[in-house]
Image (cartoon, coloured by chain):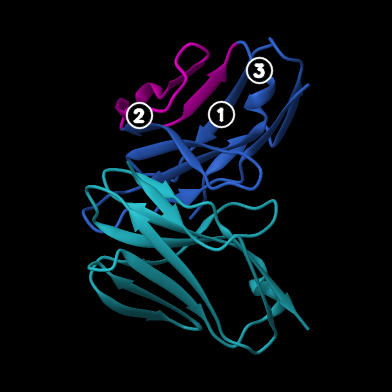
Amino acid sequence: GQSLEQPSEVTAVEGAIVQINCTYQTSGFYGLSWYQQHDGGAPTFLSYNGLDGLEETGRFSSFLSRSDSYGYLLLQELQMKDSASYFCAVQGGKLIFGQGTELSVKP
Amino acid sequence: EAGVAQSPRYKIIEKRQSVAFWCNPISGHATLYWYQQILGQGPKLLIQFQNNGVVDDSQLPKDRFSAERLKGVDSTLKIQPAKLEDSAVYLCASSSRTGGPDTQYFGPGTRLTVL
């Protein structure tokens, strides 16, 4: 079967750095994606890792280790607008989403 | 570029009634997806279309759910009859699947409440 695990919630303060971890078990793995979803909004694509290593996009970075079936999303210089749910998703024949991590950024 | 459009945004029905949702994907996107997102969970794929053909409907409860994508553009998802546990947000997404990572673009969703 397929499964993903990520923390249910994380709290941090403005300007801080936060890391959201994701471990997965799956067959037919191509890569790991991250999506952001604000309350009541649509999921929006943040990043994709098809190979091991770090991908950087502005304040957000994502990492993948295929041998460890592990990835993380790193958010730097946190802003209030980063308060949202973050989903890791395994890209195989289809996209399988984790349960999501609710990030709360405090002033 | 216009995004994925969905309607209605909200729908409240009684159990055993029927309901239909509509989706218009991003122009030129061949692949269209319907997801169900229950509160506090991640989106779960119900059905995937490539043009007007079904690629994956393994998690679609076919006794009550149906979907079609006529002419390979717009799509409708229908529930008949609805159950209480169908209360969720129904998300439509589309992608171009040009060979790279399957970046999916989501619509705003339809929030369904079954009473």
Amino acid on which the number 3 mark rests in the picture: Lys
Q: Position of residue B37 (x, y in %)?
A: 58, 40
Amino acid on which the number 2 mark rests in the picture: Gly
Q: Position of residue A31 (x, y in %)?
A: 28, 60
- The vertical placement of B110 against B107, above or below, is above
What span is in magenta? B51-80
Q: Quadrant of residue A102?
A: bottom right
The residue where tag 2 is placed is B72
Chain coloured blue in the rendered structure: B
Q: Secondary structure at mark 1?
A: strand
Q: Which of the two labelled residues, at mark 2 and mark 3, occupies the earlier sequence position?
A: 2
- Circle nearer the viewer, 2 or 3: 3
Q: Colour of chain A?
A: cyan
Q: How many angstroms separate mark 1 from mark 2 (CA)?
A: 14 Å
The residue where tag 1 is placed is B22
What residue appears at the point 21 percent right and 54 percent down from the top-left corner?
B99
- Circle nearer the viewer, 1 or 3: 3
Q: Mark 1: give few (<14), some (14-19) or many (20+) Cα within 10 Å.
A: some
Chain designation of label 3: B
The residue where tag 3 is placed is B83
Q: Which of the two labelled residues, at mark 1 and mark 3, occupies the earlier sequence position?
A: 1
Q: Is A69 left or right of A15, judged from the image as shown? A: left
